[in-house]
Image (cartoon, rainbow, N blue to C red):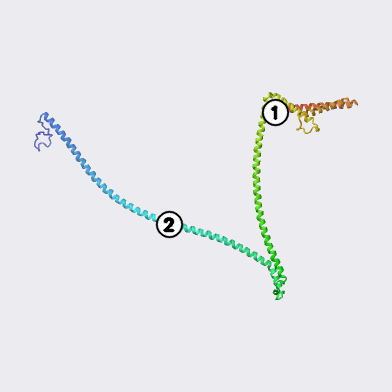
Amino acid sequence: MEMRIQTMPREETENVNHIPVITETSNQILDTGVNTLQRTLVVKKQVEMDEVDRQLALKQQEFKVRMHVLAQRRAELELKQQETKERAKKFDKFVEDNEIKRRRALKKYQDARKLNTLKQKEVLELTERLEKLQARQQYLNERVSKYKIYEDYLMKILDFLPENYLEYGSDTLVMPILRRHETLSITHQALQQRVTRLAVDLEEGQRRLESLKQEHNNHKLRTTRDLSELQSQWDEVREKNKQREMNLMLHQGQSRHQVEEVGSLLMAVRNLGEQCYFNNYGPLKDMSLSAMMDMIKEYILERVDIEKRASQMTDAGSAMTSVSEVDRRERGSMKHIGSKTQLKSTSKASGKSGMSS
């Protein structure tokens, strides 16, 4: 922008605010302002670019410094890594040496332990052998002490024998005794061998007997189990048959009341059979219904006959009185028997009806 400004001398204008004087026209002023604005923007951009270049140079310098520092740190780090690797190698070698020493010591300990175990076994074996030898020595000493008297006896006999007793040869009396002793010794050995064989055979026979007993027990257990299963099956079949019989009786048109009456009648007949029992009819449990009815009929006829005979006796009043008392007692017993029979029949019939229901 070009402006003409009239100024005063410097000495006079130090404390004076200068006001520019514009001499251009308005169009010139507008053109000049636009050009000035563009130039100002260019200058601003240039300044900004210079500032950016300056900052970039600073950043580059800072980056170079940092890269140099990082390079130094990297070198130091590589040096430390190298030292660490060397230390690690030394430590690995130290651990490996310690492991080798440990394995060597462990192997030595195991070898020493095995050797100690073997030595202990040898000590035990030698101890057992020593004990056996001591026992053998004691046994031999006892035998020597036992046979010492025979030695003394033979030495005394030798003292009494002539000096040329060996010249007699087989004609002496000692040879038959020696041969007899040899024969008896051979026989004794044969008998001992036979006893040993018989003991072995006895042990084998006992083992076979035990095995046979075991097989017999197992077979008995299996048979008992099969028998129990068959028994349970038979019980189930019998219960099913009873149920089928009851169903069959019900399906044949017999009502429950008729069945109860028949049952009570049967029970009454059985109770009367128990009261009127005769031994000549056989056991009561095996007796049929018709035979039981015949027995009851015979009992009643016998009682009636007794009553008739008693009524015909007219010897004396005392006799008549006794007969009447007997009659009353018999009637009372018959009534008692009938009431008991009726009670038993009704109770058993009610029990059967409860079971059937």
Regarding residue 325, the answer to whether it shows in the image is no
Where residue 253 appears, x then y in whole percent?
68, 23
N-terminal label among 2 and 1: 2
In the picture, the quarter occupied by the N terminus is top left
Residue 333 in the image: state x and y as whole percent.
80, 28
Tell me the amino acid under the disc marked 1: Lys
Q: What residue lies at 70% left-to-right and 67% top-to-bottom?
A: 179
In the displayed image of the protein, which residue is found farthest to the right? Answer: 315
Furthest residue toward front: 170
What distance separates the C-alpha of mark 2 from that of mark 1? 97 Å
SS for tag 2?
Answer: helix
Q: Position of residue 73 (x, y in %)?
A: 29, 49
Q: Is residue 283 left or right of residue 308?
A: left
User: Residue 100: which numbered mark, if any?
Assistant: 2
Residue contact between numbered discs 2 and 1, judged by CB atoms under 8 Å = no
The answer to whether one can see residue 38 in this image is yes
Left or right: residue 5 compared with residue 272? left
Q: Which residue is mark 1?
A: 352
Q: Quadrant of residue 134?
A: bottom right
Select label 2 or label 1 by which is in front. Answer: 1
In the depicted structure, whether residue 245 falls above or below residue 57: above
Question: What residue is shown at x 17% (from left), y 36% (from top)?
Answer: 42
Q: Amino acid at mark 2?
A: Ile
Q: Nearer the viewer, residue 130 or 322?
A: 130
